[in-house]
Image (cartoon, rainbow, N blue to C red):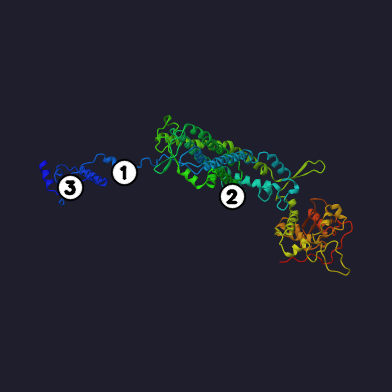
């Protein structure tokens, strides 16, 4: 074999001793050797291996070649980024750590000073907001107002003077149907929406459920903050003892050592306050959300809480310079791989044993659920009960009665208010006319009477046929004129008393008012309720209605039917109304009166 090898070598011009080979050549030869070994080529390769007429020398494996390959493998970067590294975030809490760190990758003195100022401001603003929640911004929304709500309901909502005679409903009934507006009515709308009261809601989600969802989102948001804060705390406290200098490993700023004194200071100044404020924010935030009885305000309050929680990020991103931001976000914490204290105080890692990681996961789940349940029973449930009590005091129990105080005893006298009460039907058109006159005078569309420019001018006193009481009519002026319901302020003040008016020059037939009242009462809805109103059809002026306001030997007392005309009954209450409107014609005026209207001087026909 040796002779054969020598013969082959002597016949090969390239069999001289090779020069020192490069790394790439050595790698190629090593790969060829591995391939040869895998093919299990034995004796045939011991001699000259002539392939395509070219001799292949026997390759020897260089010592340490495997080590060279391992070192040059690009997938393995010794001292590079570790998957367990914790990246610092854009936060004043994280930035505050650099006050105690040194090295070329740390902050300058000016940046540390600004960091200290902004960190103190962050704590101050969050504490101020927490104090505001506890003192003024949260709590039972109806605490201390229940008695006031009940008083307003009883003394205003059921008083006879506040009854809606047009719809035959008490003010409480009007309010509870959503057709009245004041502070109590707005509170009722919020309550009805929160509790999803039938006939007042659109079938949405009850406010209690929305509050629970908002509280759950808040709990998860705070748990995310607390989880990172605790992980940062454990990482820093378990770092190996060292100078606390930020070093650069393969271009990555890394903090992997810290002195014991600095650990204690960071824990007392940064980590413990951060965790404490986070825990207080958790419960005060749930308290704030649970105290919101308005569904519309829940979204706004949840956004406000999130802004307060992120105050550290807002200050960092709005004030700190670009260099500081790059230093903070580019630096990483490298946890201690030694796992001191048996790993009990070590932060959770991706390489954590599955048993401990899963236990931690379930622990966080039940802890979050417990926090939410605590918020429900401590904060939300009392608010729901208070809201239900407020609902009962505003619109609960009996709402269909009214009362007046007895003129002698002062004690309440009651009456039932119902659309089915026929004794009040005759006056419904009277109250409807009152409402429509006010609406037209204010420039709004009336509900029961067609609006037109002529009526608007008559009611406002700007029509050419309207004249003031102090207008002197020239002799021989036979042009008709009307008493329009518009007078000067001083004259209106003199009309405040009924007894004074009957003896006053202002006692007169209110032509425009009668015409307006007549037109409303002849509406089909009111005639259907009170057929006797058809008698106004042939009585266009006060002079024509004299038989409807004077009692000619019939029953003249309240609730009596004192006149019958062809089977139609004229109610006594309407006769009182006609007397007050046509005071001169019906004999109410006892003193000097203004000049009577000229013959045929009824109101002009309505336009369109």
Q: CA distance from mark 1 to mark 2?
A: 70 Å
Q: Is residue 531 positioned above or below 255 on the image?
A: below
Q: Residue at x 76, y 66 (%)?
A: 605
Q: CA distance from mark 1 to mark 3?
A: 27 Å
Instruction: Give the farthest residue toward the top.
Output: 341
Q: Is residue 52 left or right of residue 547?
A: left
Q: Nearer the viewer, mark 1 or mark 2?
A: 1
Q: CA distance from mark 3 to mark 2?
A: 90 Å
> Circles 1 and 2: CB distance less than 8 Å?
no
Mark 2 element type: loop
Mark 3 element type: loop
* Residue receiving disc 3: 56
Check the picture and name the quadrant holding the C terminus. bottom right
Query: Is 55 in front, or is 108?
Result: 108
Query: Is 165 in front, or is 226?
Result: 226
Mark 1 element type: helix
Specify the label residue 72 is tagged with.
1
Residue 13 image point, x, y percent: 14, 49
Residue 121 image point, x, y percent: 58, 41
* Residue receiving disc 2: 202
Q: Is residue 88 left or right of residue 170?
A: left
Instruction: Give the farthest residue toward the bottom.
Output: 476
> Circles 3 and 2: CB distance less than 8 Å?
no
Mark toward the start of the polypeptide (1 vs 2): 1
């Amino acid at each position: 074999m040796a002779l054969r090898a020598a013969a082959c070598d002597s016949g090969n011009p390239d069999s001289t001793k090779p020069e020192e080979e490069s790394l790439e050549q050595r790698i190629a030869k090593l790969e060829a050797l591995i391939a040869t070994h895998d093919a299990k080529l034995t004796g045939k390769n011991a001699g000259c291996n002539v392939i395509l007429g070219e001799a292949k020398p026997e390759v020897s494996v260089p010592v340490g070649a495997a080590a060279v390959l391992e070192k040059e493998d690009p997938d393995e970067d010794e001292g590079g980024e570790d998957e367990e590294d914790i990246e610092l975030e854009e936060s004043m809490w994280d930035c505050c750590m650099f006050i105690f760190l040194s090295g070329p990758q740390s902050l300058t003195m000016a940046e540390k000073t600004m960091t200290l100022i902004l960190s103190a401001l962050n704590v101050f603003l969050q504490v101020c907001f927490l104090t505001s929640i506890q003192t003024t911004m949260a709590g039972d929304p109806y605490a201390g107002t229940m008695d006031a709500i009940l008083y307003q309901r009883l003394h205003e909502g059921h008083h006879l003077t506040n009854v809606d005679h047009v719809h035959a409903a008490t003010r409480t009934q009007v309010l509870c149907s959503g057709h009245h507006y004041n502070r109590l009515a707005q509170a009722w709308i919020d309550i009805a929406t929160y509790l999803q009261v039938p006939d007042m809601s659109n079938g949405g989600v009850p406010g209690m459920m929305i509050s629970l969802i908002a509280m759950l989102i808040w709990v998860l948001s705070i748990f995310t903050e607390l989880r990172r804060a605790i992980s940062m705390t454990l990482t820093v406290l378990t770092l190996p003892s060292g100078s606390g200098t930020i070093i650069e490993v393969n271009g990555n700023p890394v903090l992997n050592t810290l002195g014991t004194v600095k650990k204690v200071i960071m824990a007392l100044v940064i980590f413990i306050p951060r965790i404490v404020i986070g825990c207080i924010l958790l419960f005060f935030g749930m308290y704030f959300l649970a105290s919101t009885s308005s569904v519309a305000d829940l979204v706004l309050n949840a956004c406000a809480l999130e802004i307060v929680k992120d105050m550290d990020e807002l200050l960092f991103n709005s004030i700190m310079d670009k260099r500081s931001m790059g230093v903070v976000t580019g630096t990483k914490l490298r946890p201690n791989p030694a796992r001191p204290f048996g790993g009990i105080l070590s932060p959770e890692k991706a390489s954590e044993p599955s048993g401990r990681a899963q236990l931690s996961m379930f622990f966080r789940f039940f802890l979050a659920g417990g926090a939410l349940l605590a918020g429900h029973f401590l904060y939300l449930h009392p608010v729901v009960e208070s809201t239900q009590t407020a609902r009962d005091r505003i619109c609960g129990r009996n709402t269909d009665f009214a009362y007046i105080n007895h003129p002698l005893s002062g004690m309440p006298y009651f009456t039932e208010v119902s659309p089915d009460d026929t004794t009040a039907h005759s006056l419904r058109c009277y109250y409807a006319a009152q409402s429509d006159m006010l609406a037209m005078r204010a420039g709004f569309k009336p509900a029961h009477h067609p609006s037109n420019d002529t009526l608007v001018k008559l009611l406002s006193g700007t029509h050419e046929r309207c004249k003031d009481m102090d207008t002197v009519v020239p002799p021989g002026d036979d042009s008709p004129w009307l008493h329009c319901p518009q007078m000067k302020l001083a004259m209106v003040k003199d009309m405040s008393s009924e007894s004074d008016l009957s003896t006053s020059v202002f006692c007169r037939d209110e032509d425009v008012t009668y015409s307006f009242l007549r037109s409303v009462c002849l509406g089909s809805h009111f005639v259907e309720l009170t057929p006797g109103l058809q008698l106004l059809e042939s009585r266009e002026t006060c002079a024509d209605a004299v038989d409807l306001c004077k009692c000619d030997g019939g029953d003249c007392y309240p609730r009596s039917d004192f006149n019958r005309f062809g089977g139609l009954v004229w109610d006594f209450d309407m006769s009182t109304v006609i007397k007050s409107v046509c005071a001169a014609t019906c004999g109410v005026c006892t003193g000097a009166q203004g000049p009577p209207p000229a013959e045929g001087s009824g109101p002009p026909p309505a336009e369109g």
